[in-house]
Image (cartoon, rainbow, N blue to C red):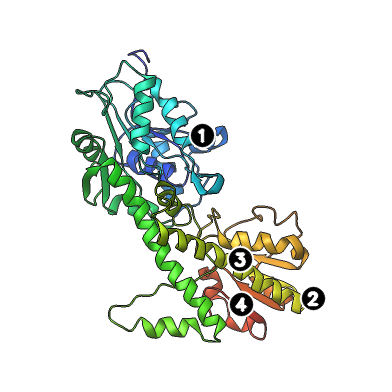
Amino acid sequence: MTTTDAPQFDVAMIGLGYIGLPTAAVIARSGLKVRGVDVTQSVVDTINSGAVHIEEKDLDELVHRVVESGHLSAATQAPVADVYLIAVPTPFKGDNQPDISFVLSALRMIAPQVRPGACVILESTSPVGTTAAIAQLLAELRPDLAVPGHSDSPDIAVAYCPERVLPGKIIEELVANDRVIGGLTDACSVRAAAFYRGFVDGECVPSNAGAAEMVKLSENSFRDVNIAFANELSLLAEEQGIDVWEVIRLANRHPRVNILQPGPGVGGHCIAVDPWFLVAGSPETARIIRTAREVNDAKAVHVANRMRAMLDAAPDAKLALLGLAFKPNIDDFRESPALEIAEELATDYGPRLLVVEPFTTELPGTLAQRGAQLVDYDTAMDQAELVGVLVDHDAFKDAPRSLSEGKITYDTRGMWA
């Protein structure tokens, strides 16, 4: 237990990544004193200097302001706080199984500091049952606390509240979007909702932890299934020599049809990951969700094979690869099919690849070691005879179309459709 005279914070944010840092900054802006916690010392040092280690619209200015005002600071150890937010990664382990070890490690970090009256909220995208699992662990680590689900008269609150934000608009959407508040008990939901209403303009909708966990997974699985339809349609159209962009444009004139745009696959830490959490929970039942994941993963393989064929057909030509991020106009390469495709091609064709990615100053992954070059758009168009569009960044859309005319092009985004 922590001594009663230890410095106390209103909020402790465990994890200062793409969600944790913006959330901590927005909460600090509301006037609460926030201590951000991260295991990486360089991240802590960067934030305490008033700077940021990730790219997100308006985040640098906001962090500088709340650090300067004293409302946000960072450390590698958890403090005593009224509210603990956990926003750490939930990656895969073998065979697409969810790994909640970072969540459990975060709970172990805060457990000695939790005092009666505190509220522990999990924000990390997690398989159903994770919130109950952290409550179970907390009850084991702190038998002196009355933990919800393990006591008839709990003296702390435990809840799940998933983030629902879009990269590039995180600061805006953290405030504007509705939040689902899933407490382990009704009282936990009320306590957590009261906290979020202090900085959220959207509606804070109470529910239970299991439903809230499934809500986040369902939202991204829904999107994944719909993208899979578009990607499969693009393969069918390609086989039959039909312009899929024309098909989608015309089909979407129907008042009850809204086909999404296909691409080279699906990336990011949400849509490419979350559906597997539902599959892992009910592997025999989640048939459509599993198939959608397989379709979208296979699309990246198909695109890589098409570009291999282009390179093999023109053995002296260079290929300009446009974009590596998982979506347009961000610097996030997590689970990016574009990066996966580029690294696959670099295995055999590295020195022939001219990569254009305006949101990085150095090639991610193994591309540089395999001989690929990071160049600007004009250089790529000047030197390459082949073009592969993997990400439709605005910088590419705004470039003169004449620079790419006459080149053999494979446009996976319909940027030039």
Q: Residue furthest right?
A: 316
Query: Is residue 86 among the parts visible in the rendering?
Result: yes
Q: Is residue 274 above or below residue 158?
A: below
- Disc 2 or 1, which lies upstream in sequence? 1
Q: Of the residues tagged 4 and 3, which is closer to the observer?
A: 3
Q: Which residue is mark 2?
A: 315
Q: Which residue is mark 4?
A: 410
Q: Of the residues tagged 2 and 1, which is closer to the observer?
A: 2
Q: Which residue is mark 1?
A: 44
Name the kind of residue labelled 1 in the image. Val
Residue at screen point 55% across, 81% down:
238
Residue 301's disc number = 3
- Residue 176: give x, y in percent of width and height: 28, 54
Q: SS for tag 4?
A: strand
Q: Tell me the crowding category of disc 3: few under 14, some 14 to 19, or many 20 or more residues within 10 angstroms, Cα based.
A: some
Q: Tell me the crowding category of disc 1: few under 14, some 14 to 19, or many 20 or more residues within 10 angstroms, Cα based.
A: many
Q: Tell me the crowding category of disc 4: few under 14, some 14 to 19, or many 20 or more residues within 10 angstroms, Cα based.
A: some
Name the kind of residue labelled 4 in the image. Tyr
- Disc 3 or 1, which lies upstream in sequence? 1
In space, the residues marked 3 and 1 are separated at their CA atoms by: 38 Å
